[in-house]
Amino acid sequence: MDTPPLPPARDVAAAEGWVREHLRAFVDDEVAGSPRFRGGQLAADAALAALDVTGYAARRNEVWPAARRGATAISPYVRHGLLSLPLLWGAVAAEPARDRDKFRDELLWQEHGRHLYARVGSDNREGLRRTLVGTPVGTTAAREAEMVEGAAGDVWDRSMACLDVTVDELVTDGYLVNQARMWLASHWAVREGRDWRDGEDVFYRHLLDGSRAANRAGWQWTIGTGTGKAYGFSRWQVEKRAPGLCDTCVHRDACPIEDWPADPPLSATEEHPRLRRDEDPAVTAGPTSPQVTGRAEQVWLTAESLGDDDPALAAHPGLPAVFVFDAPLLARLRLSGKRLVFLVETLADLAERRELRVAVGDPVEELAGVPLATTFAPVPGFRRRAAALEIVARHPWPWLVAPHGGSVASFSAWRKAARRTRTG
Ligand SMILES: Cc1cc2nc3c(=O)[nH]c(=O)nc-3n(C[C@H](O)[C@H](O)[C@H](O)COP(=O)(O)OP(=O)(O)OC[C@H]3O[C@@H](n4cnc5c(N)ncnc54)[C@H](O)[C@@H]3O)c2cc1C
């Protein structure tokens, strides 16, 4: 296995250089780390120490200027398992009740998206209960050209101040508050009738927290394929959530989004067969205690779980860890350089405390024949690769809510079923 040494920790320029040297073939944009977010457990711990949800309930939807916001910006660390949902749930126990409860509610939204994805897998890329009868804009070739532009985030009309500030944050920092995600997603799919899956891909490339679970759930929620009710975006939200922004806009006197968009043409589709019922929630959830069948030689880390508290890492303190940048997958995804820099920073930070080898290739080939310990990850890619590897110790995923066999069709149905399960 070719294992290039990682750059020193907390050195963004070195992490960027590493990505240029070893991962350049997978990146279309400039390789530059997010100016705002540093990868690594140390940075995640600092974000946790600074976590203060006072005022969260009132201000989580504020967009601009940034000083008005209540959102915590911890999502990149949540995405890669540096801050687990149970940890965050406990961390806000002493906060004011209204803010604590609102924050915990959002953690549950994250958990719901994970349960849905764990259960239906990549079928969450299709309309689960309804489809949007949108005509994708242009021919395939035109759409492909558009998506290349999309890598730079220029498919939204940047002459509009509301789109410009949000797209800029997306492509520069790799982050957006929830409200801004809804604006961009709604503008793309509801007002402009573009294919939501293309927009989801643009988000996925740029967001440091980009996950197929939460991102697809967020897009589907925005366009209404689950609930039947789309989220319309117009000037009204901008004036409410970004007061003063319209005054800076060249379109202030003739705003293209003055009015609400028309409801998108949704049509009922055959519901996914596992949406309301899971015959085997134990398989969906993965092990509830370590499953050990042999003696592991290395701990295999995945992008789902890169924290010091990764259950497999913690259970095998003497073993070296290994992470493989999945070359075939990265060749398809075309992630923005800042996502890869964030991952390299995270790995470099971990390598200060654990022996860690990093490779670039196909994980199944790179790890062939090595008895591995790993943490179960509730995503289809993990299942596929794990099935082809020699996993001798499989550790449980740190769920906030144990997956149940009831409905995941909507957040409220899922919560109701979870409560029923808990009370037996
Ligand atoms: C179109 C669209 C796409 C999205 N794509 C993603 C994505 O790829 N990855 C992702 O993690 N989230 C995604 N979300 C959900 C949400 O917008 C982000 O989790 C949140 O904005 C992250 O910022 P924060 O940490 O400041 O959130 P905070 O408001 O501070 O919330 C704290 C944590 O709660 C969770 N959370 C908050 N709101 C939501 C929500 N609506 N749904 C699910 N979890 C939530 C996140 O883990 C977040 O880090 C998307 C939402 C929409 C509408």
Image (spheres, rainbow, N blue to C red):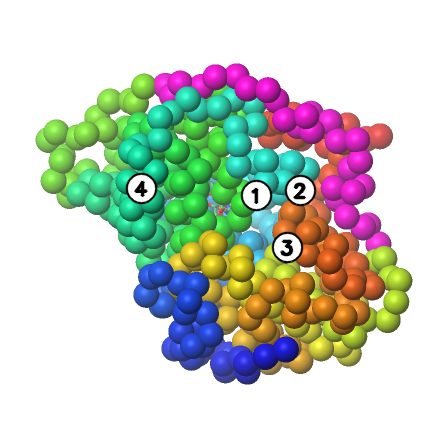
Q: Which residues are magenta?
A: 263-289
Give the amino acid at mark 2: Ala
Q: Is mark 1 within 8 Å of ligand 1?
A: yes
Residue 271 occupies quadrant? top right
Identify the secondary structure beneath mark 4.
Answer: helix
Dividing the picture into quadrants, the one containing residue 391 is: bottom right
What's the mark number on residue 141? 4
Q: Quadrant of the N terminus?
A: bottom right
Question: For the residues marked 3 and 1, what is the alpha-carbon distance in whole angstroms?
Answer: 15 Å
Residue type, numbered disc 3 = Ser
- Residue 184: percent from the left, percent from the top? 34, 39
Q: Residue at x 33, y 58 (%)?
A: 172
| Dot 2 and dot 4 residues touching (CB under 8 Å) | no
Marks 4 and 3 close (CB-CB < 8 Å): no
Residue 264 sits in which quadrant? top left
**Residue 94's x, y, as percent?**
62, 50
**Upstream in the sequence, badge 2 or badge 3?**
3
Q: Main secondary structure of the magenta part?
A: loop
Judged by depth in the image, the label closer to the viewer, 2 or 3, is: 2
Mark 2 highlights which residue?
118
Marks 1,2: beta carbons within 8 A: yes
Query: For mark 3, what is the residue?
Result: 84
Q: Amino acid at mark 4?
A: Ala
Q: Which residue is mark 1?
A: 213
Q: Tell me if residue 341 can be seen.
A: no
Q: Nearer the viewer, mark 3 or mark 1?
A: 1
In what element is the residue under mark 2?
A: helix
Gap in angstroms between the C-alphas marked 1 and 2: 8 Å
Nearest the viewer among 73 and 224 is 224
- N-terminal label among 1 and 2: 2
